[in-house]
Amino acid sequence: MATIEDSYRHKGMRQQLVNTLRAGGFSDERVLAAINEVPRHVFLDSSFVEIAYSDQAFPIGSGQTISQPSTVAFQSYLLEVDRGMKVLEIGTGSGYQACVLAALGAKVFTIERQRNLYFKTKEILELLPYRVKCFLGDGFEGLPNYQPFDRVIITAGAPSLPPKLIEQMKPGGMMVIPMDNPQGEGQTMMRITKFEDGTLKRESFGDYKFVPMLTGTGND
Ligand code: SAH
């Protein structure tokens, strides 16, 4: 079986990345500790080690990207994950965000719609010690058999608030979702809190750019 290499050099580069995020004003120490722990280079081809530890998004094949570390940090911070929480992620992609959430103590359930990416990432995740369960499917449907979730995180640009995902949230639960801007490009990062009576609070946190959240499964 393949194993992963996480050398002192990798650890040093990771510490540098954490310093960069801190210098950029990010100060959630729990999230920084998780980023310091998860070997991001494992999620990219081995020739991209330098890139793995710079604060940038990067292509991971199938037309998709691994999110920029500062975006992963910010979404993880907004999600307010506590140990033992059940978290649903839409858009597994490389699996990196899922592992950061698992390093924060979450039980992560993650859905990817692209078959190739699903199989590739599942293999990588099997080499790592994190509690992440992968599903191939359409994130708009959520995971009815595993609901309810304490937290939902969407890592693709969503055209609207997916009703089934709201339904699958616990009362008191939160969703972090980049919502397509009605005019122009990109998304606004939103946090939705669901109250006991079913009402929703919406907060917005600035502009981001994600690949689109698409319906159905495929290889496109
Ligand atoms: N969280 C990822 C970033 C993923 S990029 C990481 O850490 O690397 C967004 C991913 O969402 C892509 O892989 C894309 O295929 C997937 N995606 C888009 N629409 C989806 C949907 N409806 N259901 C599940 N995955 C979806």
Image (spheres, grey):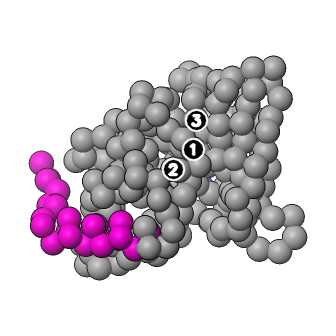
8 displayed left or right of 193: left
- Quick one: label 2, few (<14), some, or many (20+) residues within 10 Å? many
Q: Alpha carbon of mark 1 to alpha carbon of mark 2: how far?
A: 5 Å
Instruction: Name the residue carrying label 2.
Output: 76
- The answer to whether residue 31 is magenta is no
Residue 153 x/y as whole percent: 59, 45
| Residue 131 higher or lower than 155, as above or below | above
| Residue 83 higher or lower than 62, as above or below | above
In the rendering, which numbered label is found on residue 151? 3
Decide if residue 219 is in sight here: no
Instruction: Name the residue carrying label 1.
Output: 79
| Residue 215 higher or lower than 69, as above or below | above
Camera-side residue of 101 and 78:
78
Q: Are marks 1 and 2 in contact (CB under 8 Å)?
A: yes
Please name the amino acid that badge 2 sits on: Ser
Please name the amino acid that badge 1 sits on: Leu
